[in-house]
Image (spheres, rainbow, N blue to C red):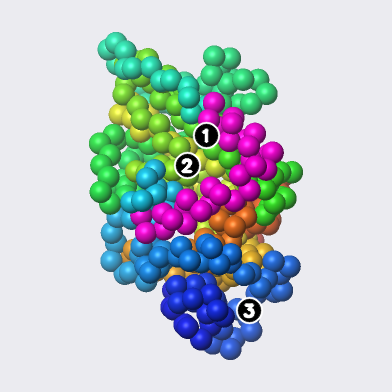
Amino acid sequence: MASATPMAAGGLGDNAARLVKTPSCGNNFFMPKPNSYRPFQPDPAQVALIPEISGNAINGLGESAPRRPRLVYWAPDPDTIPHGAMQRWFYKVNPDHPALVRAREQRAQMASETMPEVTGAPVQRVPEDWNAALAALPEDRQFGASDDRLFDMWGVAQMDPHWVYEGQTVTQSRIIMLGFAHDYAEIETAPEPEAGAEVVKQYGRAMRAAKRVAGWLRLQGWDAEPLTGPMTSKVMMIPPAIACGFGELGKHGSIINQEFGSSFRLSAVLTDAPFAPTPKRCFNVDSFCESCRVCENACPPEAIAPYKQTVRGVEKWYVDFDRCLPFFNQTFGCAICISACPWSRPGVGFNLAAKLARRSERTTS
Ligand code: SF4
Ligand code: SF4
């Protein structure tokens, strides 16, 4: 974790000192390549809002004991988190950009969709039939418009209390995960506002799908609660998405899979309807990330570390929250790392996974 080093603050103030990267042991291997967005100078108005506590400390960076996560950002009520003033500042960036205005309007329309109450006795199906019925929803005209599928990925995980934020309670036994692919032509414009608008658009789809899947379950007598990223407020999205087979964690802190790389968003539905958990998928992304440095080099504030770190008792790839956030905020969601990731380029993921499989066969034979 970057510590406050006043010598490096460069006039940004003490709280901003942690944004400045400390040279890493004189080892040039870890020095990222030049980048047209560096050096990044955060807006002083935003710097003034940085709280005393590091977001990395809230996330549990360096903690060796497992614990439940704490909400660090995207709080439904920003006043309840230390970085809430920065969250409010985010909404002031480019408020009149046409692409953002349009995407927000679409999302607001989806947010206004009402949901049915739980109706009748619970329909009984075997778990595999529940999964098959869920998988068929995007083809159902009642749920998925022909030009805008209800969802692009789905999976189911048995609920794990370690995914639930401190102070929150989840009683349901299953979490249905839903995935929504970005239009790559839009996301590759990152960090331009068009990429931010594409993210808002996909979160709008994510909200619509989570509500409609939850409504579909309620009408079959099963209670169901929709959760939409990024403001899930209750449950971390990435761990259950990995558990249900959406892919593996990449060095840039997002999931990678063969179908969409990292270019997708998530939502979820909590329920007790007895869906069958879907299997985790592993295709050795770890070994790929160990020798790839694309996202490290692309990240303007150098927030992506070249090595894994311990977070709440687990060794994993971790993005420095304090360094990422100001650039993320200033560019309405950044998204450079997910668009630069080679796996995100359409049509590339399956070939990369096949190459990894062949490499693994060679080394084990
Ligand atoms: S989203 Fe954050 S980690 Fe990713 S490139 Fe942007 S600043 Fe870096
Ligand atoms: S850009 Fe390379 S190192 Fe970064 S997440 Fe993607 S594959 Fe891994």
Q: Is residue 350 above or below residue 324?
A: above
- The answer to whether mark 1 is within 8 Å of ligand 1 is no
Helix, strand or loop under label 2: loop
Q: In this view, does 146 lie to the left or right of 256?
A: right
**What's the distance in space between the residues labelled 3 and 2, CA to CA?**
33 Å
- The answer to whether mark 2 is within 8 Å of ligand 1 is no
> Which amino acid lies under the numbered mark 2 shown in the image of this protein?
Gly
- Labels 1 & 2 near each other (Cβ < 8 A): yes
The spot of residue 211 in percent (x, y) is 45, 26
> Which amino acid lies under the numbered mark 1 shown in the image of this protein?
Ala
The spot of residue 62 in percent (x, y) is 37, 71
Q: Residue furthest top?
A: 120
- Labels 1 & 3 near each other (Cβ < 8 A): no
Q: Nearer the viewer, mark 3 or mark 2?
A: 2
Q: Mark 1 points at which residue?
A: 206
**What's the distance in space between the residues labelled 1 and 2, CA to CA?**
8 Å
Picture quadrant of ligand 2: bottom right
Helix, strand or loop under label 3: loop
**What's the distance in space between the residues labelled 1 and 3, CA to CA?**
37 Å
Instruction: Determine the residue positioned at 45% across, 72% down.
Output: 15
Helix, strand or loop under label 1: helix
Crowding around mark 3 (Cα neighbors within 10 Å: few <14, some 14 to 19, many 20+) is some
Crowding around mark 1 (Cα neighbors within 10 Å: few <14, some 14 to 19, many 20+) is many
Can residue 151 be seen in the rendering of this structure?
no
Q: Mark 3 points at which residue?
A: 31
Q: Which mark is residue 229?
A: 2
Crowding around mark 2 (Cα neighbors within 10 Å: few <14, some 14 to 19, many 20+) is some
Residue range (magenta): 81-109
Can residue 214 be seen in the rendering of this structure?
yes
Q: Which of marks 3 and 2 is nearer the N terminus?
A: 3
Q: Which mark is residue 172?
A: none
Q: Earlier in the sequence, mark 1 or mark 3?
A: 3
